[in-house]
Every structure is written in structure tokens, then in C-alpha cells.
């Protein structure tokens, strides 16, 4: 099996299952038309769906995130002066807690559809890493809760309609459960284990993540899997930053099943950030979310599909942004960077010509979004260790 060192591939996600704990009813607001069928083109960048949204006569960039409530940037709120509903304490997937304002957003246009009275969270999206996307907000499930939404990654199209019968490419139907902010959950079965409802999170660039309980159930019943890799640290970014250090596992399974589709020999991850099916599932087929009737559809080329292993997917470490610094988030055991002494929490100053100390946003966004270092063979890394000492290591990409 080939293993390779890949740097600067960061799993940046907003996992919104449990992100909002408060008294505001997010399921408010309305759409301007009763009968509609809108096709919205989107960009697909780092497993994020970027859709054009028109507000105040200007086209903005929003991330379509089924696992999140609707969110707008602080800059957009300052411009629009939407009515503030109240402030609430919000907990993200890493259990980071902050007090944020919620507003009522009006005149939000997706294609020819106008949405009014939509509760939205206000957040500082002008900061790294969110600034890399130049996004003004997130389109969350609460905005689309009365619609049917089809996601076609191959065509890079989002279809929003009021009637499931207006759509093609549906596939089989299964039940959809909605949480208090209308985020969708579907049944997922791993290696024959009893199916559980997991969040379908289009804002997550995972394939599948399972929590400790799911993992322990697999272990208890001796299901067919093995631990491919073990890591330590925090490699996931939530809305308010990285999480606490923990053990993370990558599991190789015999199968994974959802909506009558089986994916063979998949690799999934175990962490404490919750059970979810992420955006990488979109490369296997077309997803349709019938929020109105609480149904889920998945149209794929066949009922049994092989897992698509990412190219050069073996990661030596995952970086995170913490306190406006570029840090080592998670290190995989027995990787090259592990043997050379990199540890979670080390601040990375520089990799080759990219200076993260003096130009964090420029260097991070350029290298991460464009995968500039993906094909780099030789790395010169300068960092600060846990004792505050400046260190420097040089390495060559290694494949076995």
C-alpha cells in the first residue's frame, strides 16, 4: 500500500449538529412564491458548495451548508442593519462556546426566489479560514425547510422546487429526520451494524465521521474493520475554532450502507465531533432532500459502488488556525512528521517560501485553496515547539 506525506490539506468544516442551543425558533420566515423550480449554478471549492445570493442588489457568495443554520457575516449585518432578535450562547462541534447575535434577514434572493423573515446567526466570516472563500454567509437548512433541494455535483447545479414530482434523478426513497434547526439526518449502517441516524452535512468535507459510541459498538460486536491509522490532536475546525486534543482513528471497513446504496471498502474517521455524512458523498451520486415531506433520495450509477480513495490521502499532519496562528492540529502516528518531532500545538512559521507568521491569510489561502504544496517534493518547515524554541526540519516526500 502506498503511503505519502501530504501537507496543508485541512479538513475545514462547520458541523452544525448541536451548534445552536437557545430559545430562538430558527424555523421561521417565508418564500415569496408557492410554485417554483429554480436552478442555481454553484462553485465547488474544497468540498464547499458556493452559491450566488443577491442581497441589496449585489450578488454575494454564500456556502450552502445543510448542517448549519443560516449565517451572515458581520460586515453584511452592518450594511443591511437587519433587526436583531436576541443574543444567544452558541456551542460549535468542538464544544467551543461564544455569544452571538441572531437577526431576521429579509430580501434574500436565491435565483428568482425571495426569502423574508429568516432567522440568521451573525459571525465574523472575514477572518481566516473563512475569509479564503470570500463568503458573506451560509445558506442553512432553516431557510430551505419548506422546499425540495437537489444537489448535482457533476453538473454543479442546485435545484430548488416546491414539488418532488418536478425532479428527475431521484433513485430510492428513505426517511429523513429534521432537528430543531431543520438540519437533515439519514440512516447509515456500517459493516452490518444497526443503522443510526446521522447528519447529512453538505458543509463538511468529510466522507463519513462516526463518534465514539458508534465506534465502540463496532468493537463490541467484532465487526469487520481494522484501524488503518491513529492520530492525536485536533484536526477539525468548527465555527469558533479548533477543538481539544484527542485520539482520532481512521477505520477501513468492509461496507457502508445508506438509502439502499452500498459503498465497499470505505475509510471512515472516528472523532468526538458527531456522526455525519459529508460532502464527499456527492461524488457518488445525486442527493435530493425533500424537506417538505421528510424524504431523502440518492441517485447513483449502481446499488454497489467502490470507495474512491483520495489521491495521496495519507496525511502526516493536519493544520488548524488557533489564536490567529497557523498550528499543527493533529499528527498521525508513525508518519514522517511524527518521527521528526512535530507535535500538536506547534506553531508553523514557514513552509518553503510561504510565511504564515507575517502573512497568515495570504499564505494559508493560497496554499490551501489551490493545493500548491500537494505536488511539492521537498519541504523546509520552520516552527516553534512547545517550549518556545525555534526549530527547522527539512524533508522529502516519501512514498512506500
Image (tube, rainbow, N blue to C red):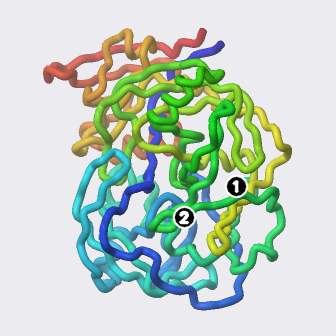
State the residue at coordinates (70%, 26%): 254
Question: Residue 260 location in percent, x, y?
Answer: 77, 47
**In this rendering, is residue 345 above or below 379?**
below
Give whichever of 207, 361 is nearer the camera. Answer: 207
Mark 2 or mark 1: which is in front?
Answer: 2
Q: Which residue bears the numbered disc 2?
A: 178
- Mark 2 or mark 1, which has the lower sequence index? 1
Task: Name the element at disc 2.
Answer: strand
State the residue at coordinates (45%, 38%): 10
Give whichever of 105, 157 is nearer the camera. Answer: 105
Q: Which mark is residue 153?
A: 1
Whole-Å distance between the Cαs marked 2 and 1?
23 Å
Give whichever of 196, 61 is nearer the camera. Answer: 196
- Which quadrant of the figure contains the N terminus? top right
Q: Residues within 10 Å of mark 1 (few under 14, many from 20)?
A: many
Q: Which mark is residue 280?
A: none
Which quadrant of the view contains residue 230?
Answer: top left
Question: Residue 117 location in percent, x, y?
Answer: 43, 86
Amino acid at each position: 500500500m502506498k503511503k505519502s506525506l501530504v501537507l496543508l490539506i485541512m479538513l475545514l468544516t462547520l458541523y452544525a449538529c448541536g451548534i445552536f442551543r437557545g430559545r430562538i425558533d430558527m424555523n421561521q420566515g417565508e418564500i415569496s412564491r408557492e410554485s417554483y423550480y429554480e436552478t442555481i449554478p454553484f462553485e465547488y471549492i474544497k468540498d464547499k458548495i458556493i452559491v450566488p445570493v443577491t442581497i441589496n442588489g449585489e450578488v454575494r457568495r454564500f456556502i450552502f451548508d445543510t448542517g448549519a443554520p443560516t449565517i451572515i457575516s458581520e460586515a453584511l449585518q452592518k450594511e443591511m442593519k437587519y433587526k436583531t432578535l436576541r443574543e444567544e450562547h452558541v456551542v460549535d462541534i468542538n464544544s467551543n462556546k461564544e455569544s452571538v447575535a441572531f437577526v431576521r434577514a429579509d430580501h434574500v434572493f436565491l435565483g428568482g426566489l425571495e426569502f423574508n423573515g429568516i432567522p440568521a446567526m451573525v459571525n465574523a466570516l472575514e477572518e481566516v479560514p473563512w475569509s479564503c472563500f470570500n463568503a458573506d454567509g451560509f445558506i442553512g437548512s432553516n431557510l430551505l425547510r419548506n422546499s425540495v433541494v437537489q444537489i448535482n455535483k457533476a453538473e454543479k447545479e442546485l435545484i430548488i422546487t416546491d414539488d418532488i414530482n418536478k425532479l428527475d434523478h431521484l433513485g430510492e426513497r428513505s426517511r429523513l429526520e429534521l432537528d430543531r434547526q431543520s438540519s437533515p439526518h439519514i440512516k447509515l449502517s456500517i459493516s452490518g451494524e444497526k443503522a443510526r441516524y446521522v447528519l447529512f452535512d453538505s458543509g463538511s468535507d468529510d466522507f463519513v465521521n462516526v463518534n465514539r459510541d458508534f465506534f465502540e459498538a463496532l468493537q463490541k460486536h467484532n465487526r469487520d474493520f481494522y484501524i488503518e491509522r491513529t492520530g492525536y490532536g485536533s484536526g477539525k475546525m468548527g465555527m469558533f475554532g479548533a477543538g481539544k486534543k484527542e485520539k482520532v482513528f481512521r477505520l477501513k471497513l468492509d461496507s457502508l450502507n445508506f438509502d439502499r446504496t452500498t459503498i465497499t471498502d470505505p475509510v471512515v474517521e472516528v472523532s468526538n465531533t458527531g456522526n455525519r455524512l459529508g460532502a464527499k458523498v456527492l461524488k457518488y451520486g445525486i442527493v435530493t432532500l425533500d424537506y417538505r415531506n421528510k424524504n431523502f433520495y440518492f441517485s447513483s450509477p449502481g446499488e454497489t459502488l467502490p470507495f474512491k480513495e483520495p489521491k495521496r490521502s495519507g496525511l502526516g499532519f493536519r493544520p488548524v488556525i488557533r489564536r490567529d496562528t497557523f498550528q499543527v492540529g493533529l499528527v498521525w502516528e508513525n508518519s514522517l512528521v511524527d518521527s521528526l518531532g512535530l507535535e500538536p500545538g506547534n506553531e508553523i512559521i514557514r513552509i518553503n517560501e510561504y510565511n504564515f507568521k507575517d502573512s497568515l491569510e495570504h499564505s494559508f489561502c493560497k496554499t490551501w485553496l489551490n493545493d500548491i504544496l500537494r505536488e511539492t517534493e521537498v519541504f523546509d518547515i520552520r516552527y516553534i515547539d512547545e517550549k518556545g524554541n525555534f526549530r527547522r526540519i527539512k524533508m522529502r516526500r516519501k512514498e512506500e
